[in-house]
Image (cartoon, rainbow, N blue to C red):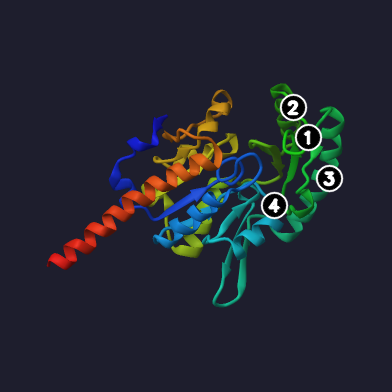
Amino acid sequence: MKPINSIPKPIFQNLIGVLTDIDDTITIDGYMPAAAYSMLERLRGSGLLVIPITGRPAGWCDMIARFWPVDGVVGENGAFSFHYDHKARRMMRRFVASDTERRENRNKLETLSRHILAEVPGSAISADQLYRDADLAIDFCEDVPPLDQDSITRILALFAEAGAVAKASSIHVNGWFGAWDKLSMTRIFLAETYGIDIDTQREQFIFCGDSPNDAPMFEFFPSACGVANVTDFAETMTALPAYIASKRGAEGFVEIASQILAIREDVSAASIINKEEH
């Protein structure tokens, strides 16, 4: 991983959008500081698409899409995307699985949750499970004393034994029955909502993240950036970002966003000067 100040300037100049994880990427110690929220607004104000790509639940994502300065949100590790049309006052929701499939899967996950809690002492159902639609979140450090890596590995294995997909974030193990991840829904959302083919335009996006469930995004986007705490998971990651901030969590995100904005503002200023001279 190279320092973010080594990212070539043309990448920042030609950006279409910034995609970002939420927990421990734009938050720090469990909250989002004003500086990080301000950066979302400033990035969007500079003409970039700004889209959180998170493991957080549908209930939270409805609020994020509706109230944050963003252009949509991908939630529950790719189970859905939400986009709020402020002019039409309409929320557009796109799920991978049908209503029937999600209902059946929730029943299976309810049974599996009891098994996991019995097998892994100290684990708990995430406090945000009430607001989830498509997955099961097992808390290993957000609202419970931190579990060791063996316990986290055991949770992942129990999901796999049940035929579910499971990914670890910095706070939860999320598991689901279905074929999706953060990248697959990002691809669908950008194509259907903005007509963008990320397979041909991946170099015009920066993804910011911090943990193992971000690995598909790190692997796909050549200019993906990690905040410094991504190194906490380096040994268990299947892919790492190309670039890394010097600071952790929200402070690292502010560092990345500040560099993007500084270069874009320099280009904008130069463009104005050139126009005035001609």
Q: Position of residue 217 (x, y in %)?
A: 50, 42
Q: Residue at x 44, y 42 (%)?
A: 255
Which amino acid, by three-letter code, is at mark 2? Leu
Spatial separation of the CA atoms under disc 4 and disc 2: 22 Å
Give the class, few, some or many, for how many residues have Cα within 10 Å of label 4's Cα (few <14, many ≥20): many
Q: Earlier in the sequence, mark 3 or mark 4?
A: 4
Indicate whether 204 appears above or below 269: above
Q: Earlier in the sequence, mark 1 or mark 4?
A: 4
Using the image as rendered, state which of residue 92 and residue 12 is in the foreground.
12
Frontmost of labels 1 and 4 is 1
Which amino acid, by three-letter code, is at mark 1? Val
Residue that numbered label 2 is attached to: 147
Answer whether labels 2 and 3 touch (C-beta < 8 Å).
no
Using the image as rendered, state which of residue 239 and residue 253 is in the foreground.
253
Answer whether labels 3 and 4 touch (C-beta < 8 Å).
no
Provide the secondary structure element on which disc 2 rests.
Answer: loop
Q: Residue furthest left?
A: 278
Frontmost of labels 3 and 4 is 4
Q: Position of residue 276 (x, y in %)?
A: 17, 67
Which amino acid, by three-letter code, is at mark 4? Pro
Give the number of the disc on residue 144: 1
Provide the secondary structure element on which disc 4 rests.
Answer: loop
The C terminus - image quarter: bottom left
Q: Earlier in the sequence, mark 1 or mark 3?
A: 3
Spatial separation of the CA atoms under disc 1 and disc 2: 8 Å
Spatial separation of the CA atoms under disc 3 and disc 4: 16 Å
Q: Residue at x 48, y 32 (%)?
A: 240
Provide the secondary structure element on which disc 3 rests.
Answer: helix
Answer whether labels 1 and 2 touch (C-beta < 8 Å).
yes
